[in-house]
């Protein structure tokens, strides 16, 4: 397979495997990817599983066309990628082996040799020149082993991403990328979100046109789609708005409750519902779908004064993969001493940023009027935001939205006649109660100030404490005049036609400008309220919460250089160029300060 004029694919498909890593079902097999770069010098990137030694060496020999390789680059030491290092070394005795120091330590464990006379140890930022192609090595510790490196080819702008961006499934099987990629990521890499975020930040400084992973297809188009998904998964944000229901039912009574609840959720506007019987489903598919959706319902029986075994496996699988930033509801069943809710609460209390609903359901053997009433109340609470989103069902005069105004951070949205725009502000206040009026103060330098002054209307979105840093990056670190801030996001619409966010807000208000006050550097818009909706009861994002818990802490230890005061980007070097522009937030050198010694 030709990837570019100089890069060839020499990997293999495995349709004989039943369980990847002896636990993940792979009905469509798996691909072991390996690559060769043909230049003045030749580099081979990774080997394949031990079951395909001769097929791989045949592929390599054919790609070489009579030449011999100069280097073998070992990015990752898991045996499905490294099993043939020794066979390669014996076949091409003059070739050097390039890898990280930790990888060579592992080679001595796997092969009883670290290839001392042939090894080239690389670390962060090291390069090797093949001729036209210069390869840069980027360390990726714990994505998902400690020795991992990825490789960037600046000539063809290709990132060889090791296990990053991989998926289950052989390359000769046509299937959607996302489901098997999600199951692969959550199952294998999901625990290491922080480390993946670090790698994504490094990758953001590279111009990438192709991604060549160690499993799954080569990615060549719409790379932003894949990068955005990895950012969502690794920051533990929900990929889709909806509810997953995971349940066990011994004799069918808990299942009947789930059927009743599912019907009520659909009737109240839940956009998507996925149901898993934990005793019968693919457990890893269930776990990955729990990460997909914004809300989770777990229903199980009390079993040996604990919870049903399959439920415990499911919950422990979530916990060990750092499940967080989700709303969770619990349903228990027990004939004489229901205890499942207490056990499940204990497990979720060990997870970060989980909103456990106060409303729960207790079934004593079978549904009755009381437990059916609890299901109705639970459905109302879970669907509160869906009802508020619905232009037909929403209460559009819910002035409790005003209670969510404080010294917080808000997203103000507007429309310039061609596209939606938005910006982050922290200067919003209620200035009158009869009638209710809101003051919104915006810097004159912001494009939104210009748009609102022309159109006279805006929406104020009250951001919640669940809002990730990516929202502040998108709406706060670039100008709407030159950027489409809603690219990749499908907003909802209020009656005035303006956008409001489908998540991360507890309320919004549609405002009509009644008066404008010139405040020199800023303009204050005094507005009446045309519409106000309450979406959830999650706390509003305060300025202090943002700085304490959301804004990334710059990784400056042991570094010499400058840090961006806006987003925390670190520029390493003794001198900051006067024309330097931050690659993350686009602010100039004046917004950088020296790293404190």
Image (spheres, helix red, strand yellow):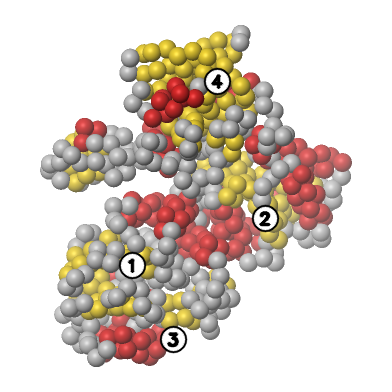
Q: Are marks 3 and 4 in contact (CB under 8 Å)?
A: no
Q: Where's residue 335, x and y in %? A: 82, 51
Can residue 151 be seen here? The reply is: no
257 on left or right of 356 = right
Q: CA distance from mark 1 to mark 3?
A: 23 Å
Sequence order check: which comes first, mark 3 or mark 4? 3
Q: Where's residue 165, x and y in %? A: 43, 63
Question: Eyeballing the image, is 148 above or below 344?
Answer: below
In which quadrant of the rendered image does the N terminus lie? bottom left
Q: Are marks 4 and 2 in contact (CB under 8 Å)?
A: no
Residue 493 sits in quarter? top right
Q: CA distance from mark 4 to mark 2?
A: 40 Å
Which disc, if any, is residue 274?
2
Sequence order check: which comes first, mark 3 or mark 2? 3
Q: Secondary structure at mark 2?
A: strand
Q: CA distance from mark 3 to mark 2?
A: 37 Å
219 on left or right of 539 = left
Q: Nearer the viewer, residue 140 or 231?
A: 231
Question: Eyeballing the image, is 17 above or below 335?
Answer: below
Which disc, if any, is residue 51?
3
Residue at 21% in and 59% down:
125
Residue carrying label 1:
160
Sequence order check: which comes first, mark 1 or mark 2? 1
| 4 vs 2, front mark | 4
Q: CA distance from mark 1 to mark 4?
A: 51 Å
Q: CA distance from mark 3 to mark 4?
A: 68 Å
Residue at 56% in and 79% down:
18
Sequence order check: which comes first, mark 1 or mark 3? 3
Farthest right residue in view = 369
Q: Nearer the viewer, residue 269 or 382?
A: 269
Residue carrying label 4:
512
């Amino acid at each position: 397979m030709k990837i570019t004029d100089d890069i060839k694919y020499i990997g293999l498909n495995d349709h004989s495997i039943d369980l990847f890593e002896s636990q993940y079902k792979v009905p469509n097999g798996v691909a072991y990817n390996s690559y060769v770069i043909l230049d003045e010098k030749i580099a081979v990137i990774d080997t394949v599983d031990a079951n395909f030694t001769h097929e791989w060496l045949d592929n390599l020999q054919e790609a070489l066309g009579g030449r011999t390789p100069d280097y073998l680059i070992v990015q990752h030491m898991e045996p499905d990628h490294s099993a043939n290092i020794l066979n390669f070394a014996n076949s091409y005795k003059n070739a050097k082996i390039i890898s990280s120091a930790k990888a060579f330590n592992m080679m001595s464990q796997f092969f009883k040799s670290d290839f001392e006379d042939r090894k080239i140890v690389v670390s962060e930022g090291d390069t090797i020149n093949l001729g036209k192609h210069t390869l840069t090595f980027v360390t990726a510790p714990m994505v998902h082993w400690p020795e991992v490196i990825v490789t960037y080819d600046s000539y063809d702008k290709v990132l060889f991403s090791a296990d990053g961006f991989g998926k289950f499934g052989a390359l000769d099987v046509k299937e959607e990328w996302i489901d098997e990629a999600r199951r692969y990521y959550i199952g294998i890499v999901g625990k290491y979100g922080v480390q993946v975020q670090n790698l994504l930040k490094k990758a953001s400084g590279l111009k990438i046109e192709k991604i060549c992973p160690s499993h799954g297809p080569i990615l060549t188009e719409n790379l932003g789609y894949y990068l955005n998904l990895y950012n969502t998964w690794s920051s533990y944000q929900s990929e889709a708005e909806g509810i997953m229901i995971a349940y066990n039912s011994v004799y069918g009574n808990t299942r009947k409750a789930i059927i009743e609840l599912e019907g009520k959720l659909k009737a109240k506007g839940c956009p998507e519902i996925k149901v898993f019987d934990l005793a019968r489903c693919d457990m890893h598919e269930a776990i990955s779908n729990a990460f997909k959706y914004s809300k989770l319902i777990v229903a199980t029986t009390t079993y040996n004064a604990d919870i049903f075994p399959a439920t415990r496996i499911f919950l422990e699988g979530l916990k060990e993969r750092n499940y967080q930033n989700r709303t969770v509801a619990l349903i228990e069943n027990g004939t004489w001493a229901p205890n499942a809710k207490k056990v499940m609460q204990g497990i979720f209390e060990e997870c970060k940023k989980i909103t456990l609903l106060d409303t729960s359901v207790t079934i004593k053997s079978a549904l009755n009027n009381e437990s059916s009433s609890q299901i109705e109340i639970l459905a109302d609470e879970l669907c509160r935001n869906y009802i508020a989103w619905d232009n037909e069902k929403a209460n559009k005069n819910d002035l409790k939205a005003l209670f969510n105004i404080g010294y917080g951070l808000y997203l103000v949205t507007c429309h310039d006649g061609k596209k939606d725009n938005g910006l982050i502000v922290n200067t919003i206040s209620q200035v009158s109660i009869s009638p209710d009026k809101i003051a919104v103060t915006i810097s004159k330098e912001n494009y939104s100030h210009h748009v609102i002054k022309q159109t006279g209307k805006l929406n104020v979105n009250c951001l919640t404490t669940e809002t990730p840093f990516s929202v502040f990056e998108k709406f706060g670190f670039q100008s709407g005049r030159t950027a489409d801030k809603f690219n990749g996001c499908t907003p909802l619409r209020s009656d005035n036609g303006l956008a409001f966010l489908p998540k991360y807000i507890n309320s919004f208000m549609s405002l009509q400008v009644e008066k404008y006050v010139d405040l020199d550097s800023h303009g204050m818009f005094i507005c009446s309220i045309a519409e106000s909706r309450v979406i959830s009861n999650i706390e509003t994002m305060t300025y202090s919460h943002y700085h304490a818990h959301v804004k990334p802490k710059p990784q400056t230890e042991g570094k010499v250089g400058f840090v961006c005061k806006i987003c925390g980007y670190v520029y390493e070097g003794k001198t900051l160029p006067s024309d330097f522009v931050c690659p993350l937030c686009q602010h100039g050198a004046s917004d950088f300060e020296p790293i404190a010694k």
